[in-house]
Amino acid sequence: MTRTAIVTGGASGIGAAVARRLAADGLDVVVADRDERGAAALAEEIGARPWTVDLSDTATLESRAVDCDVLVNNAGVQRVAPVHELAPEDFRLIHRLMLEAPFLLARAALPGMYARGWGRVVNVSSAHGLRASAFKSAYVSAKHGLEGLSKVIALEGAGHGVTSNCVNPGYVRTPLVEAQIADQAATHGIGEDEVVEKIMLTRSAVKRLVEPEEVASLVAYLVSDDAAMVTGTSSTMDGGWTAQ
């Protein structure tokens, strides 16, 4: 039996790497993203199915039917500002997209998983799900909430053959991060390698970015049968950031 996996934010970055890996592993992948062209292009490339969806529209998502064996909650955005300057709508947007939407998708998918006696929920969290940084109140609080949601699903799903886990990468080499590196290099008048090592990775023992394919490999393990006893965990892939 071929298992179905939904990967949110699947058109680029970590999501695209996860979609490619799971498709290569033989899963029937659904690439969920608001980028219609990007989702369609990747789906065609890997033999998957596209799902154009704005996951921040949680009112519509409440009534959406979701049937899958594997749910990878990956979609996310970032807003950087001090608490007293952060726009309330930006705070709400991040919480809708990165906490409320994963709850609604899991809520819709779990009954089918329970009925089949097997399921995997993987939440792409962050080192910021375990630690805080200044100026990222919305992102940090949403990721901390996602950690708690993941553990509750793990406890409730245990008797139904369903596991739920978080993966917690540090800075990952995605188009968004690479753009930040270029901007910081220009702002500080230093090289991009120096930006990575001395600014972005000051708290990381390993001074390089995480590759999306490395995150995908961890996700692939967590959704496998070999990981049946791995549930309720937060698996760091942060070069030693949270070891300090």
Image: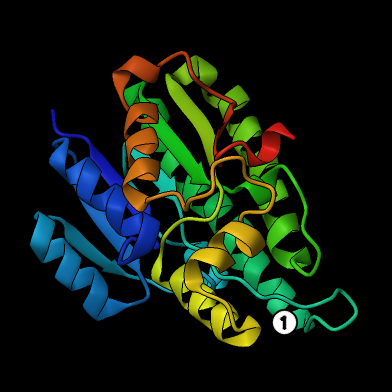
Residue in the picture at 47% in, 26% down = 163
Q: Residue 129: image x %, image y %?
A: 67, 47
| Front one among 71 and 111 | 71
Quadrant assignment for the C terminus: top right
Residue in the picture at 44% in, 49% down = 210
Quadrant assignment for the N terminus: top left
Looking at the picture, does residue 159 appear above or below residue 39?
A: above
**Left or right: residue 24 compared with residue 152:** left
> According to the image, what is the colour scheme of the structure?
rainbow
Local secondary structure at mark 1: helix
Q: Amino acid at mark 1?
A: Glu
Q: Residue 193: image x %, image y %?
A: 49, 65
Looking at the picture, does residue 209 appear above or below residue 57?
A: above
Residue in the picture at 77% in, 84% down = 87
Q: Quadrant of residue 151?
A: top right
Q: Which residue is mark 1?
A: 89
**Left or right: residue 241 compared with residue 41:** right
Mark 1 crowdedness (10 Å alpha carbons): few <14, some 14-19, many ≥20: few
**Left or right: residue 183 compared with residue 88:** left
State whether residue 100 appears in this view: no
State whether residue 107 appears in this view: yes
Which residue reaches farthest right?
84
Looking at the picture, does residue 19 appear above or below residue 84?
A: above
Q: Residue 10: image x %, image y %?
A: 33, 60
**How many circles with numbers are drawn on the protein?**
1
Looking at the picture, does residue 159 appear above or below residue 110?
A: above
Q: Quadrant of residue 79?
A: bottom right
| Front one among 17 and 163 | 17
Residue in the picture at 47% in, 61% down = 75
Q: Quadrant of residue 14?
A: bottom left
